[in-house]
Image (cartoon, rainbow, N blue to C red):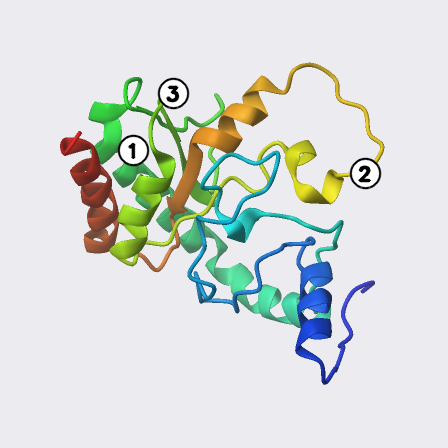
């Protein structure tokens, strides 16, 4: 399949390096399903990244996206029969979040819209805050309520530490990716979320804005 394999080591330092290279060069060393192991998730500083940037989405090395693809293919084949079900659930969760947060759209928030004549199975619900909003405070508010959040991947990747010293060319100002890097995050549309959990996510976001 072109990917796969395993690395076994007896050094915690070497393990962290190998995991970083496996996972896109990510600097964070939290295990899957665990956040803020270092208790400094929003406190680490990097020269070109916005203050309070989520450490889970800092990339210190040029890494890879390595998976055990034979196993993934086997699981994926068994899940194909549920593809329509999963897609419908993601669209339903997306629509419920969009409806609940609509009063803030165009003001405090910029909400996502589907491209015309498309019917996406939404991977997540990306939200962009108005200029001057405190994204870190909102993320910490949501995380305290055990609502998972993530940034939109690497943002402006040329500002990531992994590009320091790497010769590259930039076309344009990258103003859009800089704005995403400073002001965008997302919450989940996982098919296993029921209406109560989706409503809790929306209510928690609305609650934060109601106090401002």
Disc 2 packing (10 Å; few <14; some 14–19; many ≥20) = few
Q: Earlier in the sequence, mark 1 or mark 3?
A: 1
Seen in the image, is 129 located left or right of residue 11?
left
Q: Is residue 2 above or below residue 104?
A: below
Find disc 3 in the rendering and name its residue: 131
Q: Indicate the position of residue 33 as horizontal and vertical percent values.
A: 45, 67
- Residue 180 position within the rendered picture, expressed as x and y whole percent measured from the top left: 50, 29
Give yes or no for contact between labels 3 and 2 (Cβ–Cβ under 8 Å).
no
Q: Which mark is residue 165?
A: 2
Q: Is residue 197 left or right of residue 35?
A: left
- The residue indicated by pointer 1 is 98
Q: Is 127 located above or below residue 20 in the figure? A: above
| In this picture, residue 50 sits left or right of residue 13 | left
Closer-to-camera residue (165/127): 165
Residue 59 in the image: state x and y as whole percent.
65, 48
Q: Earlier in the sequence, mark 1 or mark 2?
A: 1
Q: Position of residue 194 (x, y in %)?
A: 26, 56
Where disc 2 sits, the SS reads loop
Q: Secondary structure at mark 3?
A: loop
Disc 1: CA contacts within 10 A as few (<14), some (14-19) or many (>=20): some
Up the image or down, 141 lies above or below 168; here it is below
Name the front one of labels 1 and 2: 2
């Amino acid at each position: 399949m072109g990917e796969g394999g395993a690395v076994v080591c007896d050094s915690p330092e070497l393990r962290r390096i190998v995991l970083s290279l496996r996972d896109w060069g990510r600097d964070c060393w939290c295990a899957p399903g665990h956040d803020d192991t270092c208790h400094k998730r929003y406190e680490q500083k990097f020269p070109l990244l916005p203050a309070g940037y989520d450490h889970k989405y800092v990339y210190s090395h040029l890494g890879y996206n390595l998976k055990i693809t034979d196993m993934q293919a086997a699981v994926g084949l068994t899940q194909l029969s549920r593809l329509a079900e999963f897609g419908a659930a993601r669209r339903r969760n997306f629509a419920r979040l969009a409806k609940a947060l609509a009063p803030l759209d165009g003001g405090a928030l910029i909400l996502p819209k589907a491209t015309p004549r498309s019917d996406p199975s939404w991977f997540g619900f990306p939200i962009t805050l108005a200029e001057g909003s405190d994204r870190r405070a909102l993320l910490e508010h949501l995380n305290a309520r055990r609502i998972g959040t993530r940034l939109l991947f690497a943002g402006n990747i040329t500002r990531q530490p992994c590009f320091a010293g790497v010769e590259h060319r930039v076309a344009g100002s990258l103003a859009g990716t800089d704005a995403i890097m400073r002001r965008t995050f997302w919450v989940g549309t996982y098919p296993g979320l029921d209406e109560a959990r989706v409503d809790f996510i929306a209510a928690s976001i609305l609650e934060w804005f109601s106090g401002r």
